[in-house]
Amino acid sequence: MSYFAYLTGLAFLVWIVMPLFKKDSTWVSLYMEAEELADKKQRVYGNIADLEFDFAMGRLSEKDFKSVRQSFLSEAGRVIEKLENQKSSKFMDRIQSDMDNLGKKKKKNKKKSKSTAAVFCTECGTENIAEAKFCMKCGKGLS
Amino acid sequence: MADFGNILLFFLFPVSVFTALTALTAGVTKRRGLLEAARRGAYAAFAVTTLAVLALEYLLVSSDFSIEYVASNTNFALPLFYKIVALWAGHNGSLLLWTWIVTIFSAIVAYQHRHKNNDLMPYVLFVMATTMVFFSILSVFISNPFQTLYQEFGNTLQEFTAGDGHGLNPLLQHPAMVIHPPILFIGYVGSVVPFAFAIAALITGKLGAGWIHTTRRWALTTWGFLAVGIVLGGKWAYVELGWGGYWAWDPVENASLLPWLTSTAYLHSVMIQERKGMLKIWNMALVIATFLLSIFGTFLTRSGIVSSVHAFANSGLGPAFATFLSMGLIFSVALLLYRRKDLKPDEEMESLISRESGFLFNNLLFLLATIAVLWGTLFPVISELFTGDQITVGPPWFNNIMIPIGLALLLLTGAGPLLAWRHTSVETLKRSFGWPTLGAIVFIAVLFASGVRDGWALGSFAISFFVMWTIVVEFVKGANIRRRNSGENFFLAMYMLSRKNTRRYGGYMIHAAMVVMFVGFTGNVFNSETRAEVGEGDSFQLGPYTFNAIKIIEDENENYSSQTLEMEMYRNGRLIDRISPQKRFYFASEQPSTEVDIYSTIREDIYAVLSGMSNDGTKVIVQVYRNPFVSMVWIGAFILGIGTLFAMLPNLRESKVGGE
């Protein structure tokens, strides 16, 4: 019985060590500022929903409701604007780097044909070009 | 089979060390292979521990008395069911259960996040694996459940197989006791998940709402299990210990209450972070405190530093726990200090009369409660340090502090949800609070007129009434608004409304559950009891009840001998029920136990205990308690469980509501 137990235990040890000997790659961290902005957007939207609920339940006066709502809306506007700016600038960066990479590849290995398979974002489902590291819609890292 | 279990349990140690190290390295290098290895480590830890648990179960069920744990916690005559649950009846087995649950949760978390949260996961797995390392050290090297039984022969210790086991502690032979420890343990251990994510967020600097969203369900589950586990413990004490109550501020009870208090505070304060981006450090601190208090609770139960009804004897685990706790504390506080600048609030508080200030008061009160309970629980240790004597603070001390705090929290339960975020004007305040307050005042007057004079009871009932009113209004008003917009009938509207924001309405259900439980707690004010020496044919009185002793029955089976007093219970001359308290003596463990008999209605419990024989041996001594509203506590806990489940349902999405 103990022989069998040792064998089982060792089998598990081998199994967990195995990935260390496979061909390895690294992942890229998510872009933090984008995450923060997405958080903020979520928060403002949640706030607006709560505010409307509170008003419907008669917990605040119409005057308060209108002024607070206005301030939330403009905050939401600011956040979305920032998000858009960031996305487009990131997109530009990536186009630039993709172009660079493409150029290098062409120089190095002319025969190797470029894969045209698209990569779908696991977060929002957007179709991205195969070389994309980030989703062009939501900014999530693509593996 | 003992070897099999022991060897596999031993493998948990290298596996968890390996997992912790690869996870940490994965975090630093961001290499996928390392992360995959750490993930497999979590699965393997679960697998080997599960096999070890199964091996121990096999030993328990097959009554292998060459194993010390089996011999001291079971015997041949013990029913199969109790043999199975003897896994957590003793000290070493319950540590193994603890360890097992940690590995289960780690494996679940590793699996849930196998394709996401790559940045956080290495550190999450690192924290969980480190916890596994600690518990594997305890289970393998200090309190091994597979230890063989030894006996002294002359000067040498020799392996020995006992003829029969000691049997299961009779106090533990009760259904509530069977589910209470695993449920409470799930609550304790579950706190490691939010903790691991919080630490991962602190290490990586990804301090946004991500870790909070990811762990929301875990935090809620943990909380619900803790709450239900605590109440089940109370139910067990009530039914099994035979002193007429369910809560005595015993150190081990307090130990389970502490992480519950901090996690309740967290569930509320996290909403301020979600809406206002405030209290980030505080929320981190609460998550950390909940985990450390859970470990502390286990430590308190297992180390015997504070004497308690059900604390296990000093087992030499103290230093190990103290080391783990202090390392956890130092590490977490250092990380918090390191990140303090990144945890600054995004917004400031705007008004004192607002939802967020309600939450702040709530947190302040929970903090006070935590400190009070911690202080009272540790007072014997602290006093021993300074005076050399263990001075215990009793239930009156706790009640004096906790009743006002509890009532203030209950009041906030009703008042908080009526406040709007950011700012509530006095005008709307009057509108929201006017009717419920008036209703509560009228309710007090009615109670006073019907003879209730106790100030605390009047206060508690009035607040309960107020809170219940506000909760009902929330549902009704919300449903009416929805009905106007959607044309659904009232009940469908109420259902849809709740399903669209399960967190809010699940929360209200839990609030309602707390009200019901508080009514149960308040019943304690009206408790009465009597003690009588009776022979066959004697009778005695308690309030409107008359008890006639019919006969005293002596009996014996292979597990225990028993003495039962059969009584008829009359109320105002009408026969209501037969009530038969029993006293047992268990042969294997040579321990007596009292089997109380309870006649329970919503209104009150009649609780009879057979205390023993009179001095001359001709009569038996019976103690009868009349406890109003006790069942409300159990009903409340049931509603609480339902509310928690409801809050975990995903929100129903609709294609379109209103004209937004």
Image (cartoon, coloured by chain):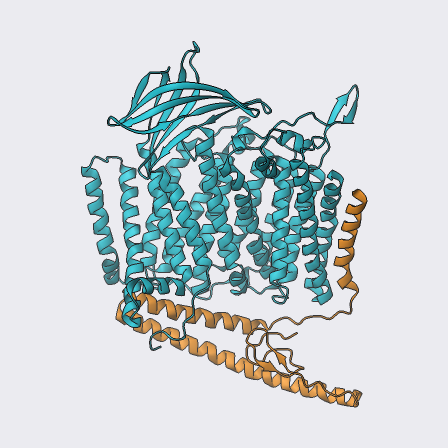
Q: Is residue B545 above or below residue B266?
A: above
Viewer-side residue, B401 vs B478: B478
Q: Is residue B539 visible?
A: yes
Residue placed most toward the observer, B237 or B55: B55
The part of the image, by quadrant, that contains residue B448 is: top left
Q: Quadrant of the N terminus of chain A?
A: top right
Which quarter of the picture shows residue B112? bottom right
Q: Position of residue B426 (x, y in %)?
A: 25, 60
Where A141 sits versus B635, above or below? Answer: below
Q: Residue furthest right?
A: A3
- Where is residue B357? Give x, y as percent: 37, 57
Q: Colour of chain A?
A: orange
**Up/down of A45 relative to B241, above or below:** below
- Quadrant in which residue B170 is drawn: top right
Residue B260 in picture, x, y percent from top left = 48, 47
Q: Which part of the image, by quadrant, shows the C terminus of chain A?
A: bottom right
Give the number of marks. 0
Residue that lies at the very extreme toward the top in this rendered image? B616
Is B155 on the left or on the right of B195, as rendered?
right
- For chain B, give the colour: cyan
Residue A84, image x, y percentages = 51, 81
Q: What residue is at 79 percent from the left and 64 percent from the top? A: A21
| Residue B365 visible here | no
Q: Nearer the viewer, residue B155 or B25?
A: B155
Tell me: B610 left or right of B571.
Answer: right
Q: Which residue is painted at 60% across and 24% down in the image? A: B588
